[in-house]
Image: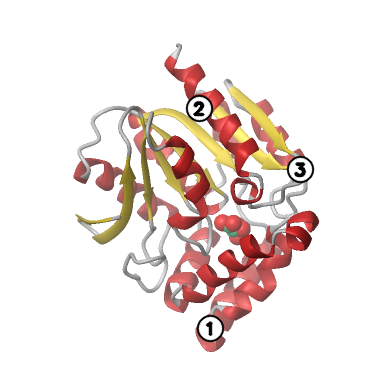
Amino acid sequence: MRRVQIPSGERHVLDSGSGPPIVLVHGFPLDHSMWNAQVKELAGPFRVIAPDLCGFGESPVQTGTVSMARHAQDLSDLLVALEVDQPITLCGLSMGGYIALEFWHHFRHQLAALILCDTRAAADTVEVLDRRFRMADIVLEHGTTAVSDAMIPQLFAPRTLEEHPLIVDQLRQVIARADPEGVAAALRGMAARRDMTGRLSEIEQPVLLIVGAEDAITPVEEMRSMAAALPAGRLSVIADAGHMAPMERPEEVNAAIVEFLESQQDR
Ligand code: MLT
C-alpha cells in the first residue's frame, strides 16, 4: 500500500503489477480489501490500483457531504499522482459504480472500459433518501455497528451467509473500523447523486456488468435494463452470489473480468 498526496488530501492506495491499468473502486462502507481476490488474480498482467476512498480504510475523513463528483475528481487526481498515462478500465461496486458513472461524466477521455458490479444508474427514491439521512444520524450517534447490522443480511446471498462465515466476518470488521463521520458523509453524498439512466446510451466504451443472481440491493433485472441501454454493454450473472459478488464468488467474477479485459486487448 502507498500513501499518495492529491489536492484534496492524502489517499491510501494499493498499486500493484504492471500492464494495462485497472482501477478497483470499493462499495459503501468498505475499503480496498473487498477486492483482495481480484488483486491476487489481476496484479501481474495488469496494473491494479485499488484506493481507500476519502473517509474509508486508512484514507482521512472529510466531514459533511462527500459527493460522487468529489470521489471522481479524486480518482482522476490519483491517476496523475501515480503517473498513469494510458486510459484505464474502471471497475466499481455499488457506490463504486455510482462513482464510475460520475467519472465517465467528467473524465471519459481517460476511460478505456467500465466494469459495473452490483450497482445502478438511477438516483435514490424518496424512501431511500429518507433512510440514508436517518442512517447518517444513527451512525453519528451510535457508531457503525448499526450499519453492519442493517446491511449484512442484505449484502450476501443466503448460501454465503450460511457457508462462508469468514467472508461475512471480514466485511463486518471492515464496517466496524469505518469512521462514523466518513460513513455519514458518504450516505449524504450518495443521496445527492445524479440519475444517470438517461445517459447510459451515450457511453461509447465497452461495459461489463456483473451482478450476483441473488443481489437484494441492486437486482439482476435492474442491471439487465442497464446493459440493454448501453451501446456496448454485456451482463454476467453470478450464481449463488448476492450484492458482494466479487467476495462471494471470486473465481467466477475473476473469470468474467479476465475474459473482458483480454477481449479489450484483442481489439
Ligand atoms: C454499496 O454497496 O455501496 C451500497 O449498497 C450502495 C448504496 O447504499 O446505494
Q: Is residue 77 above or below residue 142?
A: above
Q: Quadrant of residue 136?
A: bottom right
Q: Residue at x 68, y 67 (%)?
A: 152
Give the labeled residue for mark 1: 143
Q: Say which label, 3 or 2, has the lower sequence index.
A: 2
CA neighbours of label 1 inside 10 A, class few (<14), some (14 to 19), many (20+): many
Q: Position of residue 212 (x, y in %)?
A: 71, 44
Quarter of the image containing the C terminus? top left
Q: Residue at x 65, y 47 (%)?
A: 245
Give the labeled residue for mark 2: 203
- Kindly report the distance in space between the C-alpha atoms of the residues bearing marks 1 and 2: 39 Å
Q: Ligand 1 falls in which quarter?
A: bottom right
- Kindly report the distance in space between the C-alpha atoms of the residues bearing marks 1 and 3: 31 Å
Kindly indicate whether the residue at mark 3 contacts the one at mark 1 (C-beta within 8 angstroms): no
Q: Say which label, 1 or 3, has the lower sequence index.
A: 1
Dot 1 falls on a residue whose secondary structure is: loop
Q: Residue at x 68, y 72 (%)?
A: 150
Q: Residue at x 62, y 60 (%)?
A: 167
CA neighbours of label 2 inside 10 A, class few (<14), some (14 to 19), many (20+): some
The amino acid sitting under disc 1 is Gly
The amino acid sitting under disc 2 is Ile
Q: Is residue 93 above or below residue 258?
A: below
The numbered dot on residue 213 is 3
Drawn side of residue 179 relative to residue 73, left or right: right
Q: Is residue 227 visible?
A: yes
The amino acid sitting under disc 3 is Ala
Drawn side of residue 202 relative to residue 48, left or right: right
